[in-house]
Amino acid sequence: MLGSKSRFGKWWVYLVVTVALVMVIAPFAWMVLGSFKGEGELRRVPPTWLPESASLDNYTQLFAQLDFGTYFVNSAIVAVVVTAGNLLFCSMLGYALAMLNFPGKRVLLLLVLATLMIPGVVTFVPLFVLVANAGLIDSLPGLFLPFLAAPFGVFLMRQFISGLPPDLLDAGRVDGASELGIFARIILPLCGPALATLGILTFLGSWNNFLWPLVVAQTEKTYTLPVALALYSTGQNNTQYGLLLAGACVVVLPLLIVFLVFQRHFIEGIATTGIK
Amino acid sequence: MRTPAIAAITVAAALAVTGCGRPAENPSAAPQTAATVAEGPATGELTIWAMGAEGQKLPDLLKDFEAANPGVKVTVTAIPWSAAHDKFTTAITAQKTPDMAMIGTTWMGEFAGLGALDPTPASIDKGAFFPGAWGTTEVGGTSYGIPWYVETRLVYYRTDLAKKAGITTPPSDWDGLKAMAKAMQDKAGTKWGINLQPGGTGSWQTVMPFAWSNGAQLNNGDQWTFDTPQMAEAVKYYQSFFTEGLTNKTPAQGATQEPTFVDGSEPMFISGPWMMSAVEKVGGKGFADKYSVFPMPVKEKSASFVGGSNLGVFKTTKNRDAAWKLVQWLAKPEVQVKWYQMSTDLPSVTSAWQDPALTADTKLATFGKQLETAVAPPSFATWEQVAARFDAEIEKVAKTGADVDASLKSVQAEAQSIGTGG
Amino acid sequence: MSASTIAVPPLMEAAPSPVAPARPGKGRPGEGRAAWILAIPFTLLFLAFTVWPVAQSLFMSFTDTRQKDLRTPFSVNFIGIDNYVRALSDPVFQRAAANTAYFVVVGVPLTLAVALLAAVALDKGITRFRAVFRLGFYTPVITSIVAVAVVWRFILQPDAGLLNTVLSWFGIQGPNWLGDVQWSMPSLILMAIWRNFGTGMIIFLAGLQAVPYSLQEAAAIDGANTWQRFWHITFPLLRPTLLFVSVTTAIGYLQFFEEPFVMTQGGPLNSTISMSMYTYNQFGYGNYGVATAMSYLIFVVIAAVTAIQFRLLREKA
């Protein structure tokens, strides 16, 4: 480590960070513990911490009623396609906007930035009518196509790539690489941390998306996981908290895994660039 | 590069502007008459949307229908309650509606106004249903569907604490209710007398029963009538619970009524039949004997709010006959009873209440009695928006002691400018 | 954004560049064509699924479109800026705008500060268990809003809530956090910081990785202490990342919706209603003309705030 941090100093930092962690993670921990509690206990005020009689009832009920496999697969396909699509298309355009010159560049950049700032709710209904007219209702493409081109991703990649030294381009051209080859073989590998970040954020957004999949699906076989879980837990006048929390835990698990996998690429990215 | 783009956009905008305009408005449409339904068993395919728990349990019930009508196949799509309204409105906009659906009572006005629903055929007898519930299906004089199941609001109270407070029979009038709340605090030592919602989303469902019991109406034809003396008297009565310290003005956000009911700090509250199982879950074993319900106290009469869900058939359906046959089947008393046993949803058909399954429980019977005089707000498409304003004013009235007459005048003004969505 | 935020691998640093430094501008063969090949997939999808609905909704904001007109979008009256005027003179919308401003002005800097603090702590403060802490600090972002709401309601409860209990140890009588008009917004801001700092944290972490170790080392050898190193080396190199996180956080907070929707429904007495939530309600009532106008008013504000941030946080030449 850099500098002369005494052992005492480091120790203090660990303490602060651990206390912060406990405070930050408390609701998440409560959610997990709550999924093992009975309905009566969950409605009690003040909320209890450890379950009085832990049981898997909520989970067994959930899986018995849910056609879990179908919904999970739908969610997974949509999230993976949206994430992969964004990683690819956004880095392509981000690179073009950051480093190349072409007619219409300024207009495109302004358009992308502008739509980033438009509240999503305003395009919801026109988008639905468009998707309906295109015959994409109740289909998986209807679920992922509108989200393959997210302005956020372009903005992120452009910012990151702007920071790369332009000499890289020249060196590549001197070596005889094609323009596209420069992108694929020189620029892209350097974007590890940015791609990892974009991947996590995009996957998260897609996985937790509720309103769009609900509205686009006409039959239950096109439902994604969050939609199906809402079925089993929210009532007209009362909510089944046990099922809700169990469902929330089920939904969050893949996100944790994706996060852990992607963030390892942070560290690998660091290693190849020779930092630390 | 720039100028052609700007020119193109300007031309497009100009075209769009000149191209639009409303066609001449129709005079308010006369009540529609429905086509008749063909005789014979139902055939073909049907799609039906239903929310939440009803959506999950309906397929089981429908097995009987399919047995009685071989040749028909019904597909149920369950949709979650949260955002169900959005799902319906977007589906209607894009013309992607199912054949029929379970529709929330307060949505009827909006969907009928969008021209999405098919009028109820005359072969369905409206007298079979609770009048207030049937009223929720009527929009502009035409009925669009039937009430499927209903719910209404009663006063829940702790019988053991009431006994301590010296009350053995539930109150039957407004003074009695307030006296009971006071007695709970003074003699039974409870923190509050009664739990009432201090305004905010949905509080009209607790306030309006008092107003309706006092003979107030929300509308006269297609005019809103909020600032009437009867309404003011009822809201002042509601406000007095807060100003006299009988009710908590600032309850914890998102708190539900069971915990404080069970621990006795709020021994009375007003709600619907689903709370019975909720309080029993929290109260544990034996709690069912510690509480009971009584109807809304009488001022001019005892009126409460009737909610629940209706069944409607969409105009875009390709199998209209089968859809209405299914509706008729679901309204049969024996099917209504069976549905109650499967889902605990209360039947909307009055004769179903004669069944032993429903007469056995005294608390349930009280709900049945109240349903006879329960009413719903008018089925105007703008109700939700107007109700939100009403809720906001009630919040001021309850939490800050705002002047009731002035508040109601302001609601009336806003409601008039919002209109009734003709 | 011209400064290097990503270190050049040692290999490239060592090799001298045999040609003249890159000159911007046209004239490079195939550059334009390659650029368009790269841009086409995104652009097509973008035009179809984003730009077209935006154009449609923008058009709607100048008409008296209601729910039932959506199927016949041109059979509506063009009413110019009527909707915009109506929105701006609506007292509830004005209150919502004030609430939103409060939320952003207080919430964004605090969220950035916490996110940066967490990123620096995880990057330099500790060496072991980094993955655990990273994941832990990120959990608020991925926890279901329902679970978040239940726990935070408990934390903020007036009588037996966690926060008031802790305060009572110090002899302070805590208020009814969510039920008090004065304290409802601060409560939601606190909740929003907790919920969102994780996103900023991981982006800052990515940016911090790119600060060249060699520069830090050189400065340390020259006698700079930790704080000086941070302020004079790390922070300036972090500027583009800071701009990005600041802009995206502000854009998100200007549209804050979930917190008031789930926790307070805009109350008490409209003290927490946000512009987005009020607009959402208007969509729910079917007032499409007014609702789209409100959305575009929000857009104007977002654009203005973003422009300000670009000006403030831009790289000095």
Image (spheres, coloured by chain):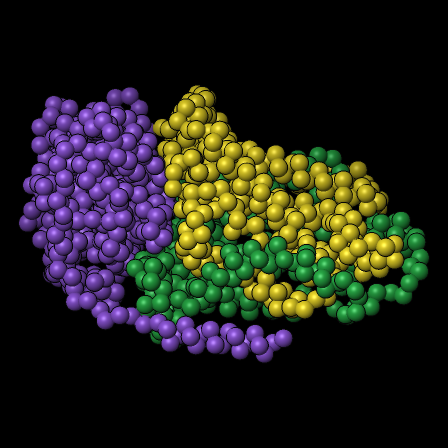
Query: Which quadrant does the C terminus of chain B fall into?
Result: bottom left
Visible residue check, residue B39: yes
Visible residue check, residue B410: no
- Chain C is shown in which shade? green
Please state the horizontal and vertical placement of residue B215, each as a whole percent of the image: 9, 53
Left or right of A87 in this view: B186: left
Q: Relative to B412, does residue C222 appear above or below in the rendering?
A: above
Please state the horizontal and vertical placement of residue A262, each as a whole percent of the image: 67, 39
- Chain A is shown in which shade? yellow
Q: Relative to A143, does residue B169 appear above or below in the rendering?
A: above
The residue under the point 34% across, 65% down is C65
The residue under the point 29% across, 21% down is B285
Please state the horizontal and vertical placement of residue B294, each as a whole percent of the image: 14, 36
Which of the chains is purple?
Answer: B
Classify residue B82 by image quadrant.
top left
Please state the horizontal and vertical placement of residue B221, each as a whole percent of the image: 12, 61
The residue under the point 55% across, 76% down is B6
**Closer to the camera, C132 or B298?**
C132
**Closer to the camera, C155 or C71?**
C71
**Closer to the camera, C165 or C25?**
C25
**Closer to the camera, B385 or A136?**
A136
Left or right of A71 in this view: B372: left
Query: Which quadrant does the N terminus of chain B fall into?
Result: bottom right
Q: Relative to B359, does residue B255 appear above or below in the rendering?
A: below
The residue under the point 52% across, 75% down is B8
Q: How many marks?
A: 0
